[in-house]
Amino acid sequence: MRLSRRGLLRAGLAGSAATALGGLASGCAVPTGSTGRDMVLWYWSGGLSDTVVKNAKARYGGSVDLRPIQIGGQYRSKLITTITGQAHVPDIAGLKGEDMAAYLPNADQFIDLRTLGAEKYRSQYLPWKWDQGVADDGTMVGFPIDCGPVAHFYQYDVFRKAGLPYEPDDVSEGLGTWEAFFAAGEQLGRRVPGAKLLTDVNGVFENVVQQGAQRYVDKDRHFIGDQEHVRRAWALAVEAKKRGLVSDLVSGTPDQLSAIQDGKLPSQLNASWASFDIKNGVPKTKGRWRVAQMPVRPANNGGSFLSITKACREPEKAFEIITWILDAANQAQGYVDAGLFPSTPASYGLKQMREPDPFFGGQVTTDVFGPAAQKIVVAYNSPFDVALGTPIKDEIKNVGVLGKDPKKAWSDAMSKCRRIAKHLGVSY
Amino acid sequence: MAVVEQSPPVVAHRPAPTGPRKGWRKYWHLYAAISPFYLIFLAFGLFPVGFSLYLSFHRWDGLGSMEWAGLSQYQYLLGDSDFWASIGNTVIIWALATFPMILLAMVTAVMLNSAVRFKSVYRIAYFLPSVTSVVAVAIVFGSIFSTNSGVVNAVLHGLGIDQVAWLNTPWGIKVTIAALMTWQWTGYNAIIFLAGLQTVPGELYEAARMDGAGPVQTFFKITLPLLRPTLLFVLVVSTVTGLQSFSEPQVLLQTSSNDSTFAGGPGHSGQTMVLYFFQQTFDNNDFGYGAAVAWGIFLVVVLFSIINWRLVQRRGD
């Protein structure tokens, strides 16, 4: 057969077209979940202890190939994409706490962990954390990883110099109400020139809201962001501004970090995981910090879950792996490796969590975060909370940063919420 | 089908197939050769575009079932003050960035065009910012424009001017974003202007010099009019990039991990159209409304394109 150049070209093209078509055809047969012995676990960097994940891989290697994958970037978008596309859905998926409101209404995409016998583990976990993983219809979607008890981080020497209580127990007690906390802030400003108690008003507003059992939208899809609990948080934030307790800095900026380092921002109300941010952001402040209880009662900020998706072919095995990864001993390891504060109170007494932390002047911070974690109350997590909480948080920020009139800011926030509520079908 | 009719008589003894079918059979390998483009465009361009239109008539949280919403998303969009504000922000930032940039780029190009030593070194140096990652640049600008420790405020302080809270005031935010965009694109556009300058025939300058025109007069009477096509090109390209600005404000105004990264700073002063689209879609999980916002942005871009097109048309007169 004489092979012309054109003929060769044609054959080559036909071949590549066939390959492409074949690819498309097999594309139509993309597996929904994993195949073979694989058990795919999706999480994000720092979402689980890498040591524990590695141990789990070895431990269950006899029956499944646990394939842990760290997903970077927009985690939720990527997970939603695979679930909606019904392709390559992981068997076990980490769910971030702030995204739970988006997953829970779609509980049918996940396996109800109650059907796998989750109930018998319940007593080992923080009750409020356990409830956060349960959808309205009772389906248990998420198994608790960590939690984020909020506490009062402060610089020992600065507080001492300002004539304030400076030992952790004294700070917890002496600054136990918002009034006492604010008065301490005024004293700090007088005694230490240029020092402010908090970075911004949102630190007050959001923590007060988080302390409560209600947020912006309730279970019956009704807007409650105009009620007493939000108004009180608003009033306290405005008061902090009026009494000159907040800086004009933006958190996370170089300005804020240098102010923290100089002792001009010696105090912050932040979750347990913030100790890692402080250690990384202002390493020179090592040894100066202590942790105490925040005013009134602890709040929670963050904390995530593990779930088993509908695509998982061996839910029993997956559940076995999850419960092992998240047992009290491994959660203590997670705290050491990744700063994940355990949702298992039994971990708080373990050796890894009783180590004095030189960054905090040798304080055992679990003594503060542990009791705090057990006293948290949480609010109903509505899928509309983000949309309807944002205008209020934006406006209080305008009051704090831009000096907007609080009355005008509040009425602007409310009129915006009214529009958004109507649009989303939330009753106002 | 003129081409088909002119095909050689070799095919004449075959049963004549119908026109288009025959064309397809004859040219399929050509279509196959260019298929990577249109197949990929179909999958990753056209389909998402069409789907976003479909999406904008629905309510969808990204996971559950879609719910028909009719025109309500668009109705809401028209009355959404945040969306209009984001258009305003985008246009203001674009104007603050583009006009100084064009001026600077032109001056730079004229200077590069005159005989200096190390010409290529300068050209490379000016081009570098445009190929630098926006994220890295934004982080550096965040430091340069910080209130207490920033270089800009240090210079202002040295001149006896009050500090400005650049990243904490509505105008400060806009100016900072614009400064970043100006810095990033001045060199790139200077190179384009330079290319334009080099097409201007040297005789014209010579003639002008003989007629006694000074450098300033030469610039306004000869260089500028002949650079007009280049100027329009630069304007069009910066409109396209300016209207899509996203990473600059996102990285510059990103604060603590708790905050939305799409909020655009205090008072949403730096929230551009695309940031607003991201906030609605990915913060609020409101994919239907996000799609409607995207189509709103599309209309704004169309409007600007028409304006640009008119400008180009006038050139042809």
Image (tube, coloured by chain):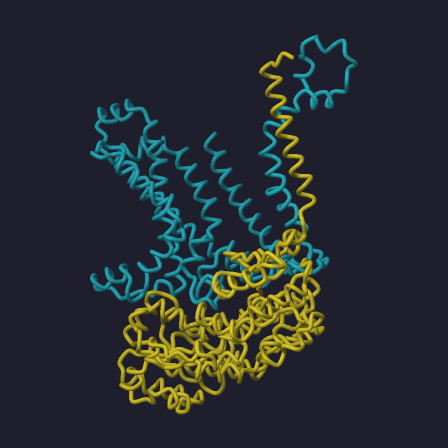
Chain colours: A yellow, B cyan
- From the top left corner, tell me how far across and down residue A360 is, in percent: 35, 78
Q: Provide residue A343's location: percent of width, then percent of height.
A: 54, 76
Nearest the viewer among B298 and B38 is B38
Q: Is residue A328 left or right of residue A365?
A: right
Q: Position of residue A133 (x, y in %)?
A: 62, 72
Residue A214 in sight in this render = no
Tell me which residue sits at (59%, 42%) in the image: B45
Residue B203 visible within the image: yes
- Image position of B114 with respect to B172: above or below: above
Q: Is residue B105 above or below residue B79?
A: above
Where's residue A222, x and y in %?
66, 75
Tell me the quarter of the picture where residue A264 sits.
bottom left
Q: Depth check: A423 or A17 in front?
A: A17
Which quarter shows the N terminus of chain A?
A: top right
Q: Quadrant of the C terminus of chain A?
A: bottom right
Residue under the point 39% across and 81% down: A364
On screen, residue A189 versus residue A228, left or right, reads: left
